[in-house]
Image: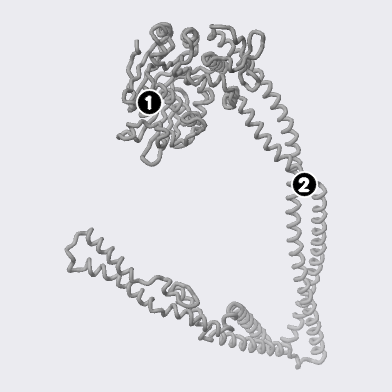
């Protein structure tokens, strides 16, 4: 990855669009110098590149105040007198205040890429837009107002993972903290670079699941399921026995019905012979009367069961009607209705009917609203019309009152029931009379008459038996329904127990596999960690020997299993951290950064702010001649004039292919000028 162009727009000290052409020559020099005094925009440039690649990251938000992390919007827009924000102060008060961002263009083996990250502030909320446009096969990737994830994150992470940014883009003044702190954050970062954090995530996830599987494996046992299975079998057997009994009853009922039909046919023949033509008419009358009786009884059952509680409590209905009348006839209701009618008519007649007032449309509208407001102020509220026992709106009270009056003052329902009962009694009497006539076989011969009576008696006995069997069938149906409900519940419970047992058995299997996987991961992690630790230790010592030349106090830098640094002398004895100067610590940290960059095998520009602080002249020369020209294929250095005097400048000059000078006398509008100090 080689940066070709950086464009900063209204960010930090850069007002408007400020561009840096960073395209290197085909071969030869690899260093860009961007000069600037303190406060002129060097750190702003460094952080702009970080913003482009990682957005408003945790690292940037915690860099403002030690031990404190700003919120995203506070970092971008500022936070009172604690932090001015990313948005340039002059741009905030100008027409361009709604947009600010960074555009970064680079070249990689596959082709060129343009990355543009922009924030849009409308005075209330801030939105974010990220667009990545490669010249090769992939389509442009755009994120709008969303977290940096999916395709966008994957694209950038493949080129330069966020964990590697501190080893390619850094402020040299803060580098020595790496060598002296041995902080958890630094160790975690190194583990992330070496892909060990992914293993930690897997181990944590696996550990959580092992706890769950261990609990699930103890939930159920086979004995509980066997007991439930026996209960299901017992209820199932009872259902089967009842079903057999029901089948027997159905067979007996079927046989009874056949016998009854046969006897009825014989009786019908004798009736027809005894009654001649009258039998057919009586049969028709019986059918018609039976239908009338069934309809009248059904009507009585429907209305009586629904309305009898109200109809038999006339006194209570009268009290309710009296209370509802208080609402329906309340004087305020009439007032409300009259005012409503006035509201409908008055504005039309006053403002729109001729002769019209000589007013503008807006004046008419204002007067209309004022009239409406004044007249409505005289309308009583709904609660002013709810006196008495009930608290109902007048419209609902009127509807309920109409229904209550039927039972309070009108006895139509009771009269109708009385008529229905009298009619039912009459129809039953008529039906009995028809049956009596149908069974009148007095004109038959004595033998035929005796035979008729025997058949009639037999039919009566069979119908009595049929009624008894039907009652028994009803009882069996109820028993079967109850048993089937119980059976379904027990089967559901058994299925649930079996599922839980299967899950428990599966959990036991998962638990065993998970425990073996946990052990394998630990072994793999330790092997990988030791192998990568050895690589880091070798790379760091190699680079430290290149940079450190004043003495041999530190013969070896030991990288421990937790990636903390410890120093040994020529005899292998540990050297106390307090015995090492600040400059030497910075060289150790610089060697650590260089070595880690080697181990990651990533090709990206190295960008260093304030590169030579706290380091003596000899080791400054080592950095200039041994580190900067070899730190990467492209190295961007942000020095002050005091760091690179003429002598040191001449040492690095053969490796420099472009220089820029930053000027910012106002403090809020950095100007970018081509050319250096010398």
User: Which quadrant of the figure contains the C terminus?
Assistant: top left
Residue 114 position, x and y percent, is 42, 24
In this orientation, does residue 113 appear? yes
Point 41% across, 11% down: residue: 644
Residue 583 higher or lower than 384, as above or below: above
Point 48% across, 28% down: residue: 63
The residue carrying mark 2 is 220
Q: How is the image coloured?
A: one colour
For residue 316, the mark is none
Q: Quadrant of residue 666?
A: top left
Mark 1 element type: strand
Residue 575 higher or lower than 56, as above or below: above
* CA separation in Å, label 1 and label 2: 65 Å
Residue 310 position, x and y percent, is 57, 80
In this orientation, does residue 277 appear? no
For residue 8, the mark is 1
């Amino acid at each position: 990855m080689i940066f070709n162009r950086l464009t900063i727009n209204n960010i930090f000290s850069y007002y408007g669009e400020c561009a840096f052409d960073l395209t290197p020559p085909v071969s030869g020099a690899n260093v860009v110098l961007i000069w600037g005094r303190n406060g002129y925009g060097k750190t702003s440039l460094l952080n702009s590149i970080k913003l482009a690649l990682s957005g408003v990251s945790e690292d940037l938000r915690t860099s403002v105040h030690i031990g404190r992390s700003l919120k995203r919007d506070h970092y971008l827009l500022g936070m009172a007198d604690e932090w001015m924000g990313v948005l340039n102060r002059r741009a905030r008060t100008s027409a361009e205040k709604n947009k600010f961002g960074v555009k970064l263009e680079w070249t990689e083996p596959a082709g060129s890429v343009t990355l543009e990250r922009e924030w849009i502030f409308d005075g209330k909320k801030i939105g974010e837009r990220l667009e990545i446009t490669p010249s090769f096969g992939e389509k442009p990737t755009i994120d709008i107002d969303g977290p940096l994830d999916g395709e966008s994150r994957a694209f950038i992470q493949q080129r330069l993972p966020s964990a590697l940014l501190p080893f390619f883009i850094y402020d040299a003044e803060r580098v020595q903290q790496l060598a002296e702190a041995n902080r958890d954050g630094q160790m975690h970062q190194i583990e992330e670079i070496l892909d060990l954090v992914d293993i930690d995530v897997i181990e944590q996830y696996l550990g959580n699941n092992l706890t769950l599987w261990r609990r699930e494996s103890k939930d159920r046992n086979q004995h509980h399921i066997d007991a439930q299975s026996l209960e299901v079998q017992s209820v199932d057997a009872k259902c089967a026995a009842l079903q057999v009994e029901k089948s027997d009853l159905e067979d007996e009922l079927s046989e009874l019905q056949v016998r009854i039909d046969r006897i009825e046919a014989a009786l019908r023949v004798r009736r027809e012979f005894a009654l001649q033509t009258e039998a057919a008419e009586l049969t028709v009358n019986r059918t018609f009367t039976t239908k009338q009786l069934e309809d009248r009884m059904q009507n009585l059952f429907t209305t009586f069961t629904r309305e009898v509680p109200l109809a038999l409590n006339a006194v209570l209905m009268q009290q309710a009607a009296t209370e509802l009348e208080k609402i329906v006839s309340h004087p305020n209701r009439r007032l409300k209705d009259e005012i409503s009618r006035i509201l409908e008519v008055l504005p039309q007649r006053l403002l729109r009917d001729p002769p019209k007032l000589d007013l503008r449309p807006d004046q008419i509208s204002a007067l209309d609203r004022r009239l409406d407001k004044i007249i409505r102020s005289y309308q009583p509220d709904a609660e002013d019309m709810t006196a008495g026992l009930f608290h109902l709106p007048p419209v609902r009270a009127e509807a309920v009152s109409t229904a209550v009056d039927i039972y309070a003052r009108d006895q139509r329902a009771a009269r109708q029931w009385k008529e229905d009962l009298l009619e039912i009694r009459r129809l039953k009497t008529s039906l009995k009379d028809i049956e009596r006539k149908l069974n009148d076989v007095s004109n038959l011969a004595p033998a035929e008459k005796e035979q008729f009576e025997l058949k009639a008696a037999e039919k009566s006995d069979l119908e009595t038996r049929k009624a008894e069997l039907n009652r028994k069938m009803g009882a069996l149906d109820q028993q079967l329904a109850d048993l089937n409900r119980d059976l379904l519940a027990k089967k559901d419970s058994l299925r649930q127990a079996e599922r839980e047992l299967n899950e428990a058995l599966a959990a036991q299997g998962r638990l065993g596999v998970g425990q073996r996987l946990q052990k394998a991961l630990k072994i793999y992690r330790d092997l990988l960690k030791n192998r990568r630790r050895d690589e880091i230790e070798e790379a760091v010592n190699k680079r430290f020997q290149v940079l450190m030349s004043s003495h041999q106090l530190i013969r070896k830098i030991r990288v421990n299993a937790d990636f903390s640094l410890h120093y040994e002398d020529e005899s292998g004895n540990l050297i106390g951290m307090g015995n090492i100067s600040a400059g030497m610590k910075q060289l150790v940290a610089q060697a650590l950064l260089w070595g880690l960059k080697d181990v990651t095998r990533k090709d990206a520009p190295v960008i260093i702010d304030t590169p030579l602080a706290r380091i003596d002249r000899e080791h400054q020369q080592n950095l200039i001649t041994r580190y900067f020209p070899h730190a990467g294929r492209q190295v961007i250095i942000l020095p002050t004039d005091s760091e690179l005097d003429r002598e040191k400048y001449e040492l690095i000059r053969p490796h420099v292919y472009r220089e820029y000078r930053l000027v910012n006398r106002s403090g809020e509008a950095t100007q970018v000028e081509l050319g250096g100090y010398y």
